[in-house]
Amino acid sequence: MVAEVLQEMDTFSVPFEAMASQCEVRVGARGQDHARRLAQAAIDEVRRIEAKYSRYRDDAIVARINALSGHDWVELDTETEALIAYAQTLYHSSEGKFDITSGVLRQAWDFRNQRVPLPDELARSLSLIGWYRVERAGGRIRLPLPGMELDFGGFGKEYAADRAANCMAERGARHGYVNLGGDLHVIGPQPDGSAWQIGIQDPRDPGRIIASIPVRRGALATSGDYERFFEHEGRRYCHILDPGSGYPVAYWRSVSVLAPLAIAAGSHATIAMLKQEEGLAFLEQSGLAYLAIDSEGRMHSRDAGQ
Amino acid sequence: MAATRQAPGGAILLAALALPGLAGAENAPEQASISLKYLDYQDRQPNLERVGVHSPSLELVLPVAGRWALRGALVSDLISGASPRYHTAVSGASRFSEKRNAADLSLTRYFARASATLAAGRSKETDYDSRFVSTQATVSSADNNTTWLFGAGVANDRIDPVNRAVKDEHKRTLDLMLGVTQVLGTRDIGQLVLGHVRGRGYFSNPYKFVDTRPRTHDQNSALLRWNHHFSASGATGRLSYRYTTDSYALRSHTVQQEYVRPLKGGWTLTPSLRLYTQSAARFYFDPVYDTRFGAPFPPGFSFAARRDLSADQRLAAYGALTAGLKVEKQLGRDTTLDFKWEQYWQRAGWRLFGSGSPGLERFSARSIQAGVTHRW
């Protein structure tokens, strides 16, 4: 399902759709065939991860773990075990705010019908949250309570961007990037050596760019309150939910972070969103470059190398 | 924010780097590279230029299929200078000139959290032929914060000196290594490497008349390294300490400090300082000679009694200081030029933890290396 390859000098752009997002592979190559081969490897990798970590496919590992919640152990493969170890680091580094068991809150929050949940609906979901409850031993995992769920959606897209970029780099790509719905991994600069100019979307105006960041290598990821939200009685409810209160966060409109890997950039951005007013101190302490826009529209930033 | 506290950002990034297929501890080289270097070495003593070495070398690294790396190197040394003498204090040496050629090849397979290397090589001079094979493996923990290192190698040397002092002699060595590298927070890495070398065979210098060394030589060593990254300047400090002790009763201590400082415009400066001290081998004798036979025979020398003896300066007790500076310049994205200068000074009086061997002449050496590396 590779869309038409559009030639732009010696860089090629291959748009595609994956993980419910608009995606693009852009690569500097010696010709269309070469570009297509490189891009195909990246897109195949994105599709592999999408299928493997889908919550909706019965044969996917996450669906299996969730289906056996309250019952049995599930054997983990190396990749999944590594991602779960990563999730554990996120849980500790965020003081419990980034919790991959908090996906059950989606049952209480109905974004399609734009309905604020009733207190007992929220309480039921909250009772099933808690990374500390998850049992792990010898490469196996078990969710102890029936109805508990794991969800890799908090970093799956960024992980796929990193893996896809690595696939292209392994095949010799030196220039280009993988962009999965705004989470980017830049393999290397444009063929002439200059940086890619990556625009950051205005969180209140989808058509407007509020900043442009030059990136030669590394990753940029953004977490915002504008990806999925509804407004009810003058209040905005976004899809980033605090696992403690069960309510959407409200302090930041968006947080963009630059890091060597998209998964690290995205995790920092999401944790900053979840930490609300403490998010700025968290970003400062990370030492990474960021651009954060608070609920009043004020910009906070730190440049790379500061 | 306290600089000493590990930043959560650092922990997340480290955890991310540990994920498979991204950037593990062991990364196969992504680019092929070729390095051409030229080394010029000259050592000297007061009023005497001793050995000079001119040594061009070529190294090639080829990534294969993203999981393998093939590395090959060729070195040719042209050695000229004063022939070996009894003690360094004795002058009047004749000149010699010699050529050594060496080649080695290694193949590394990279796994998600491990690597395995097999290497073999050969070095050949007219009177000395050395071959080795070695294997090395690294294994990292799931979080990639700890890496274990295992190594083993064997070397087989054949010694056939032109003066026929001995004929078809052999030396075999077995080399074992065990190490661990530990990430200590976001800015520090520590490493401990323990080594054991077991040698059997001919260790004497056939060109020295009074040089008889034991036919067994075992050595144990411990190396402790600590690298610290200064995030304010982007510089890295590398501190190391090495201790060795061997069956000759020779003990040595080495402390080295390097400071890698990246500058604007693709320049990197690396000044370094190394302190070294060693005790004498138990069969080393000072330059005091027998009154009947004169040099090179030590007092009380008997032709009948074969006992271990050596006047080799390298087995004496002394201390040494090395100062160096490396300058690197990145040209474009794929080419690096480097230039390294090192000066070595050795004095008996600089020995630490004891007195130096008496009567040793001062000794110094200077080495200059220039190189170019290209990646593609």
Image (spheres, rainbow, N blue to C red):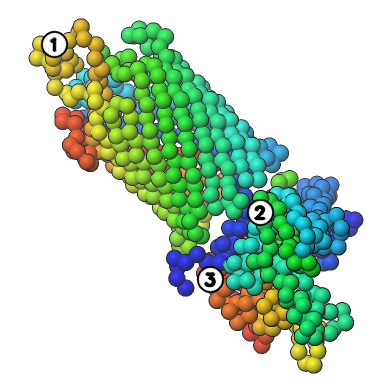
Q: Amino acid at mark 2?
A: Ala
Give the answer, above or below, for where A283 lies relative to B362.
below
Mark 3 vs mark 1: give the one in front. Answer: 3
Q: Is residue B169 left or right of residue A244?
A: left
Specify the label residue A137 is tagged with. 2
Q: Amino acid at mark 1?
A: Phe
Q: CA distance from mark 3 to mark 2?
A: 33 Å
Give the camera-side residue of A6 and A267.
Answer: A267
* Image spot of residue A162 (x, y percent): 70, 57
Give the number of callouts. 3
Q: Which residue is rendered at x = 61% and y = 58% of the image?
A: B15
Q: Residue furthest bottom?
A: A233
Which label's residue is closer to the chain start, 3 or 2? 2
Q: Quadrant of residue B159?
A: top left
Give the camera-side residue of A119 and A106.
Answer: A119
Q: Quick one: SS at disc 3? A: helix
Q: CA distance from mark 3 to mark 1?
A: 75 Å
The residue labelled by disc 3 is: A285
The residue labelled by disc 1 is: B293
